[in-house]
Image (tube, rainbow, N blue to C red):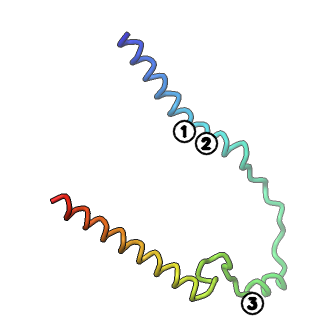
Amino acid sequence: MKKFLVLVAALLLVLVLVFFWFVPQLVEFTLNRVRASTSRSVPPQARELHEALEIVDLHADSSYGEETYSKRAAEATWMFRDSLREMWRWKSLRR
């Protein structure tokens, strides 16, 4: 019976390793193929336009406005302080 359990555990370990090691690589290889680039050189007008543009990340939290960003940071700070106070309170009660 003990040999059987060891065999089942070893088989389960091998299956887990195969699943987490080989399956992601297989999915990556089959679904995320990169095609050969057929692009030509960039025209000078496009290069000049690209250099003149200002690139902005509009998905950043800081772009929502200073008030919203500061409010979120303050709420997170108070939540952290409250959790620390609660933790110290429980520690002092346990003594």
Q: Closer to the camera, 12 or 35?
A: 12
Residue at disc 3, secondary structure? helix
Amino acid type indicated by mark 3: Ala
Q: Residue at x 68, y 44 (%)?
A: 29
In this rendering, the label closer to the viewer, 1 or 3 = 1
Q: Distance from label 2 to label 3 (Cα)?
A: 41 Å
Query: Up-down: is 62 above or below 37?
Result: below
Q: Residue at x 73, y 46 (%)?
A: 31
Q: Residues within 10 Å of mark 3 (few under 14, many from 20)?
A: few
Amino acid type indicated by mark 1: Phe
For disc 2, the marked residue is 24
Residue at disc 2, secondary structure? helix
Find residue 91 and report its image quarter: bottom left
Which corner quadrant holds the N terminus? top left
Q: Distance from label 2 to label 1 (Cα)?
A: 7 Å
Q: Distance from label 1 to label 3 (Cα)?
A: 46 Å
- Please provide percent x and percent y for residue 66: 57, 88
Amino acid type indicated by mark 2: Pro
Query: Up-down: is 93 above or below 8?
Result: below
Label 1 vs 3, first from the N-terminus: 1
In this rendering, the label closer to the viewer, 2 or 3 = 2
For disc 1, the marked residue is 20
Cβ atoms at labels 2 and 1 below 8 Å apart:
yes
Residue 3 relative to residue 21: left or right: left
Q: Residues within 10 Å of mark 1 (few under 14, many from 20)?
A: few
Which corner quadrant holds the C terminus? bottom left
Find residue 52 and report its image quarter: bottom right
Label 2 vs 3, first from the N-terminus: 2
For disc 3, the marked residue is 52
- Please provide percent x and percent y for residue 50: 76, 83
